[in-house]
Image (cartoon, rainbow, N blue to C red):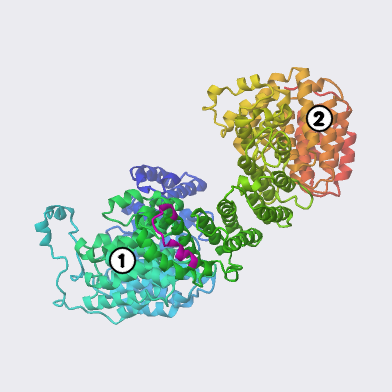
Amino acid sequence: MDKYQEQPHLLDPHLEWMMNLLLDIVRDNDSPPALVHLAFKFLYIITKVRGYKIFLGLFPHEVADVQPVIDMFTNQNPKDHETWETRYVLLLWLSVTCLIPFDLSRLDGNLTSECGQSRTSVMDRILQIAESYLVVSDKARDAAAVLISKFITRPDVKKKKMADFLDWTLLTLSKSSFQTMEGTIIMDGMLQALAQVFKHGTRESCLPYASTVLECLDKCKLSESNHTLLRKLGVKLVQRLGLTFLKPRLAKWRYQRGCRSLTANLRLSTPDEEKQIPYILASDSDEDYDVPEEVENVIEQLLVGLKDKDTVVRWSAAKGIGRMTGRLPKELADDVVGSVLDCFSFQETDNAWHGGCLALAELGRRGLLLPSRLTDVVPVILKALTYDEKRGACSVGSNVRDAACYVCWAFARAYEPEELKPFVNKISSALVIVTVFDRDVNCRRAASGTFPHGIDILTTADYFAVGNRSNCFLNIRVIRGLSTKALHNLTPQAPEYITTIVFPKLLPLAMCSDLHTRHGAVLACAEITYALYKLATEKNRYKYICIIFSVIFDKTSLYNDFLILFLVCTLIKNLSLSKMPFRGDPVIGSWQWLIDDSLKSLHLISSTSRQHVKEAAVSALAALCNEYYLNQQGEVDPVIQDELMKNYISELQNTEEMIRCGFSLALGSFPSFFLKGKLKLVLEGLKAVTHISSKDLSFAEARRDALKAITKVCQTVGVKAEGSQDDVICKENVSQIYETLLGCMNDYTTDSRGDVGAWLQCTGLMELTLLLTRSQPELIEADVCKQIMCCLAQQSSEKIDSFDPPIPHVPYREELEKIFPKSESAILNWNAPSQAFPCITQLLALPAYRYHVLLGLAVSVGGLTESTVRYSTQSLFEYMKKIQNDIQAMDSFSETLLQVFKDNLLNDRVSVPLLKMLDQMLANGCFDIFTTEENHWFSLKLLSFCKEEIKKSKDIQKLRSSIAVFCGMIQFPGDVRKKVLFQLFLLLCHPFPIIRKTTASQVYEMVLIYSDIVDPAVFDEVMTILSDTAWIERGKICKLIIITVTTIRLNSPIKERG
């Protein structure tokens, strides 16, 4: 049924037959109670999806159905929390059957039984059922309130029971307290029942009790409760009481647009006829409005509800304001509007602003906000569209802006265009700004759907276009512009206005004490300056920059403002790109100091802002060097070069990882003229960062950025085979660079973020190889090429990625071209395990790639991703079937497999999934060819490696995987079987209960498969010990193991499979 949650009306054609099918089970006396409850549970699920109001009309509601439904309650226990769905549906069913158009007393017959005892009438039984379920803690309480609303408002019940029921309800309500959980549940039931009664009951029947109920409700002080639902029900009941005090009428003074009838609207299609419609009718002074005193109390409580801390309460209060105002005289209604406008004071919280917006929308939608009030309302709504209040490190107000958009939507559909014409420009401008630049996607979408006639705007800023923040700020900005990037694009449209009006307004904001205001103003100055440079039409733009420097680059004002670091670096970059005339000016030293300070402060910045500051500083450094450090001869000042290189390379060994990251990327951003003569020094410094030591084992991010810097440096200086290793990539340094890149391929560092070592794998390898193959392919040696291809094969089998460089010396090139034909390169989806792994496992037949492919497959077959595990395992087994009868191929494969195990002992990232892969291979008979020989070398080495891997280990996952491997190795005959059983017995005595229990369970299954290892005379006893022993209790286990060992024949052959 979940698929129908968004469009439940699609169920309507099927509801009747589904209900009849389930009710047949309920009515069948032979149906067991469990089946009956299941039928009711299904009925509840359907009710939940479609809503009980639609469902009620489908229940059978004949006179004959009343008594059976009541009788079903006799078997129900209100305290049984397993069958609450049954009681919920029964109460809804009873609420329909009690509406029969006959006096319920006719169903009683003779109330005196044969024994002389009087029976309870149907009316009393229904009332008792309803009252008993109003105080339960499950959802049946909601259905009981619905039953009360239908039952108490019947004409015959109303005369006899309504007063008593209300007395009982108010007495129960006054005795309960929302300070306790039980009291909260009882008050919830009472308030729901009262709200439903005053909603469905006639005014004449409810009016005598309304004042008493309101007085009792005031004494409860629900506004002080912390329970949202109680406050919401209190507001709901208050508005129902207010509507009871006022006569139901349609205010003649309300504003009307068109007619409620579609036919009448179609008739009034011509302009002349439309002019004849009296939109605002005369005042209703001819009618006598009797407004009770209690109405003032009701409206006051609803106004307080508009300021509640929860949205559902404010929304209920707003609807109550709208309903109440529609029954008031014009003067009093205007007073209510004035009271709502008082919510929009800056002394009020965002809750009051939000509730006020909801109330204005309701008033406008109902035509109760007259056009004469628009001059007061529109300025308030414009403020609400930009409402934002800072609270600590965050801000609130998105709900206010969203509600303000709803107000605009309601106004656009409630008023004629002529009424809104004086305000259209202001409203539309504000809405476009929200559509494009609001930081919350729900506000952008709400604003984009508010334009009733703005087809051009809607097609540009539709629901999906405004969903992406970057798209809004950078692509839809042509509509309006207030952000810095938008100002950059708008500058060419009006350069004089931007320079003479906008820029001077931004300068004071750049000196504002508010960090966020200063941030936006400085970024805007940077973008405008760069845009003016590109336009090259404004000659006096420099004077504004000189003014701002005195403030922006004051070191004391920037210290510790890390948000400002980002904008200052952005400003430096844009000013450098704008070729500002500061060559040789001391301000360049200040700029360099700011960039260096930003890089040194990275470890002090929050993780969410760190990357932005780092990228901004590196970009600023590159722009600064290109513009201001290159002299007329096209060379760099050696003093500046030596100083920067010395400082930057020394920071590569900083104890803070983030500082290493920043200065690594900074070295990678230097232009070619700055690296000339220093390339060897830079590469050695970056290589040192990639080296793993015990002190910086966790610095995977620094190693990754160092590799990125090496790649960037190589691309910057270019390749020249016979060049100097201090200037370009040449035959003297290419092997050292590849050594650094390939060395990082075996980084399997893991931490709380996961496999962080994977960040380094293949980083820079593709870029450098492509760079060499395009210019100097002869620099790639055969040994290097082999290492590259092996590493790529390993990574492909781990992560499913592709790489096909046209490089020389590729081992088994012809075989690779058959496995990966060029004709299928565009079809093969490397992201799909089902397509990639069948190709990858074919590389196992090529000795040069087998080791690395097996290393990668171990991670995939023993991994966690379901699709990767499934298809990698399937492809591996298909390959093993091809070679499992070829002893030479199996020996070669097994030797490589054991070498992978040996090289990665105690490396949990590889060894644990490798054990899982070995378990599956042993279970699927991949090594059956070795079971014909006793003490085969493969089984002995595998056992040795497994023992070494789990020695002193406390890793539960590793130990459980090794148990499965040991049980699989029992198939190998000879002394190895004794050693395997000994390891299993040791694991049965392991300190960890979960390991003992797992071992016993798997040994039990092993003995069932290989039953010949146990003496038939004691087979049953052994199986009983394994299955019935409480392996949690370690004390008794060692004695059992001694008994079990003596009963197992260690040298007996194993039966053939099947």
Q: Earlier in the sequence, mark 1 or mark 2?
A: 1
Judging by the rendered image, the residue that carries numbered circle 1 is: 362
- Where is the N terminus found, in terms of image quarters? top left
Give the alpha-carbon distance from disc 1 to disc 2, as whole Å: 78 Å
Judging by the rendered image, the residue that carries numbered circle 2 is: 970
Please indicate, yes or no, whether residue 657 appears anywhere in the rendered image: no
Task: Tell me which corner region of the image, top left, top right, bottom left or bottom right, holds residue 557.
Answer: bottom right
- Image location (x, y in percent) of residue 419: 21, 65
Is the residue marked by circle 2 packed among few (<14), some (14-19), or many (20+) residues within 10 Å?
A: many
First to last magenta residue range: 533-546
- Image location (x, y in percent) of residue 115: 43, 63
Query: Of residues 911 and 518, which is closer to you in this image?
Result: 518
Q: Say if the magenta span includes residue 536.
A: yes
The amino acid type found where label 1 is placed reads Glu
Q: Is residue 463 above or below residue 870?
A: below
Mark toward the viewer: 1 or 2: 1
Residue at disc 1, secondary structure: helix
The amino acid type found where label 2 is placed reads Ile
Q: Are marks 1 and 2 in contact (CB under 8 Å)?
A: no
